[in-house]
Image (tube, coloured by chain):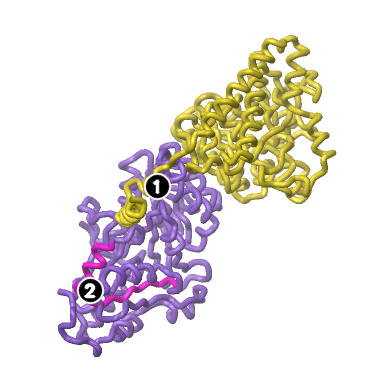
Chain colours: A yellow, B purple
Amino acid sequence: MVRTSLPARERSLLPTDEPLSLLTKTGEPVADPVLEMPGDDVLLELHRKMVVGRRFDTQATALTRQGRLAVYPSSRGQEACEVGAVLALREQDWLFPTYRDSVALVTRGVPAGETLTLLQGGWHLGYDPYEHRVGPQCTPLATNTLHAVGLAQAASLKGEDTVALVLVGDGATSEGDTHEALNFAGVWKAPVVFLVQNNGYAISVPMSKQNAAPSLAHKGVGYGVPSVLVDGNDPAAVYAVVRDAVRTAAEGGGPTLVEALTYRVEAHTNADDATRYRDADEVAAWLDRDPVDRIESHLAAKGLLDDARRAAVAQEAEAFAASVREVMNTDVEVDPAELFAHVYAQPTSHLQEQAAMLAEELA
Amino acid sequence: MSALSMSGALNRALADALEADDRVLVFGEDVGPLGGVFRITDGLAARFGDRRVFDTPLAESGIVGTAIGMAMNGMRPVVEMQFDAFAYPAFEQITSHLAKMRNRTRGKVEVPVVIRIPYGGGIGGVEHHCDSSEAYYTHTSGLRVVTPGTPQDAYDLLRDAIDSPDPVIFLEPKRRYWSKGEVTPGADRVGFDRAVVRRPGRDVTLIAYGPMVATALETAEAATEEGWDVEVVDLRSLSPFDDETVCASVRRTGRAVVVHEASGFGGYGAEVVARVTERCFHHLHAPVLRVTGFDIPYPPPKLEEHHLPGVDRILDAIGRLQWDDEVVGAGRGA
């Protein structure tokens, strides 16, 4: 049977008017003509990783209050995207995250201590990108889109079966690099998937001041990139959409732009005050669409989530949080000599002089 | 050995690098069938195919950003920015990502990308086609910045740049593209980080690079009529800077003038003057002077001759090196 790829349903590059979904907000399954409901094992894994991811997120926020992290941008409420998209990747694929995607990193298997190195302040990056196939977390926004396209295109030139998934937020879709990346990906038919987590706000700026298009997914059309709008609080749908886009890219079908509609439940970071720009009612309405509750309800109704499993997952999440506390409560020591170690492949004589000066100061 | 123009030497270097290493890719605007607006990539797409040498969409940030991603995946991209001022859209990718990737990732990720940029004036170009943008790049640690002054160096430095594990800003003095010289492709190279003495002299050191090397040599010839024996040092590598070669020359001559096309204020020459003064103070008989472009936006073609340092302005600076004040034997360096 010839598989119908998602955008082909419209016979155009445009997204659907309504976001695709596989689970209602109370967890009832939704039949979709193209989108395939993930198997039970995948749904259980989505649930497990989302519960663990959320616990990690609350733990990281708590660590900022204890002064163990300089700052933490929470992704609470976005777990369907953080986990669904990452589980849809294959081992050989690459992930290009932003600073808000720490949950995606731990879901991908990056150790928590290495994930939080950036925010702890020990170095700009704690993990080996090649070990996990995860690019550095992007802080300037949208610059990672081009790295993803380049890496994916190089894979294609080398005949490697590798797809790059790049994560951006709604604000980053206004940056020029997003548009250049969509255009390059479209022209090259690069095996890359763009996932826009539209969480409603770029720090304090709402969508109404960011974008005049019917959706952010519409931005793919001008670049010849098929686009999909998905319910970003529906983990089954996010997984299925990204999985399909990865498969399409791997088969030579080129890039896909996915916009996932979700919500940033917490403030931008612990240093932000969200009450200055949004109402509690709005937050409450989104809490009613919680992605973790949604998959739990679905699995429970299906008889897949009994008390024992629920307890086991909760216990795993607590154990993970405890391990995060342990790692973060250990003081990080960085050798000042490392300041000069990675500027060039070989330190220049000029940097050697400065390193010697610092060493003398510290002696 | 054969006589080649600088553009021919660059073309040969790209071809030899593409031949030597399958990971080398050449891309940018118009570099495919056209061969680039200056024809530096002439014939390369036909010879190596459009998977190795290809045109991209017209977007400089896109070109550099995708080059970074390709380098992360094992390639060695050599990309062309069509003109100096057209590279500015790529500035964020260059300064925040290309330059810092090794440092950010604690040495785990190397991005051996070469960015070729035709720079400088003297070709009658209209606005945005004649900037000398070197100081933007030399101020950014993590980048190597090199510029050839001769066809042989165009070949050698470009091969060195492509072989380098560090990202390289390769500045091509576009007004010298058509100047000819002997080029031996397999010759022993001077060393990527090294400056060279292009012309030995006893009285004063002219420190120049890129397009000003030829002007400095011309000045040295003219200076003989004034009785000055001028040494010309060609920096080649602006970053890192070869203190050793430059300071050895200044210690010999006791006088120095730094020449560049770029505006002087906050410019690259200020760094050279500071370094020379800090290291050679007791050998100097006069302050180290600069001859640079004025502190103005690059002028229109009909006025550029007034802006660009030329032989007379450099000779005038040499004349102001306090020759009459000199006390014979007062600590002059050997």
Q: Is A283 left, or right, of B233 in this rendering?
A: right
> What's the mark number on residue A336?
1
Instruction: Indicate whether B297 appears above or below A330.
Output: below
Q: Which amino acid does label 2 sit on?
A: Glu
Residue in view at x 35 percent, y 70 percent = B274
Horizontal side of residue A80 vs B29, given as left or right:
right
Distance (Cα) linking label 2 and label 1 = 41 Å
Q: Name the residue under label 2.
A: B231
> Looking at the picture, do discs 2 and 1 lie on one chain?
no
Taking the magenta stretch, the answer to whether it contains residue B256 is yes
Query: Is A339 in front, or is A59?
Result: A59
Q: Which percent across, then down, holds residue B16?
A: 31, 47
Q: What is the span of residues highlighted in magenta in the rendered image?
A: B243-263
Task: Depth check: give the residue in front, A291 or B214.
Answer: A291
Q: Residues within 10 Å of mark 1 (few under 14, many from 20)?
A: few
- Which of the 4 image quadrants contains residue B203? bottom left
Q: Which of marks 2 and 1 is in front?
A: 1
Q: Can residue A207 be seen in this view?
A: yes
